[in-house]
Image (cartoon, grey):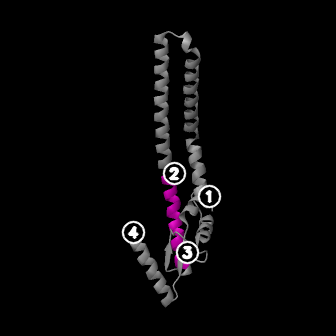
Amino acid sequence: MKRVIGTVVLLVSCLALAEAADFRIGIVDTERILRESNQAVRAEKKIEKEFSVRDQEIKKLIKQAKDAQDSLDKDSSKLSDSSKRLKEREIANLNLQLQTEQREFREDLTLRKNEELAQVLARADKAIKAIAESEGYDVILQEAVYRNPKVDITDKVLKYLDDEPTEGSGK
């Protein structure tokens, strides 16, 4: 609640200043930066490549568990009780292993995405500051419920990021 009140006070202050003097405000759509910037797209591809081997391993494990269950369902009537229990235990262990692998995969993937997106956001912040200084903005907000296209500078930030040299790009 305090954050909302603080934002409202900031906006009212900005509007009052805008009326009183030449005041420039800009707004950036951070979600769009994370979707459309070249750095974000490259990060997503990098992560996909990093995790593709583990993804394939999990898919193999899923198929193995499904095949084992199908085999048990098909041959259940032919198996002795002890063989059936042994197969059921093997399937339960496979499913447990699968759940563990999937959980670890999701956790590692989330961590890597957060690391890469933090780098993109750091570059975006640098771009926003450079644009603010070079174009004389007084305030730039990164989130807004509504943004008038006149004050939305997301395209400028995206262009700045596209023009910015990145590690290993040779720019």
Contact (Cβ within 8 Å) of mark 1 with mark 3: no
Q: CA distance from mark 4 to mark 3?
A: 26 Å
Which quadrant of the structure image shows residue 64? top right
| Earlier-in-chain disc, 4 versus 3 | 4
Among numbered discs 1 and 3, the one appearing first in the sequence: 3
Q: Secondary structure at mark 1?
A: loop
Q: Nearer the viewer, mark 3 or mark 2?
A: 2
Q: Nearer the viewer, mark 2 or mark 1?
A: 2
- In the image, which disc is placed on residue 131? 3
Q: Position of residue 94 (x, y in %)?
A: 49, 26
The three-letter amino acid code for the residue at tag 1 is: Ser
Cα distance between the residues tagged 4 and 1: 40 Å
Q: Of the residues shown, which amino acid type is indicated by label 3?
A: Ile
Q: As rendered, which of 153 and 38 lies closer to the eye?
A: 153
Residue at 55% over, 12% down: 77
Give, as a single range, the part of the protein colored magenta.
114-134
Q: Please report contact status of discs 2 and 4: CB closer than 8 Å, yes or no.
A: no
Contact (CB < 8 A) between labels 3 and 2?
no
Report the Cα–Cα distance between label 2 and label 1.
21 Å
Mark identifier at residue 169: 1
Q: Which residue is mark 2?
A: 113
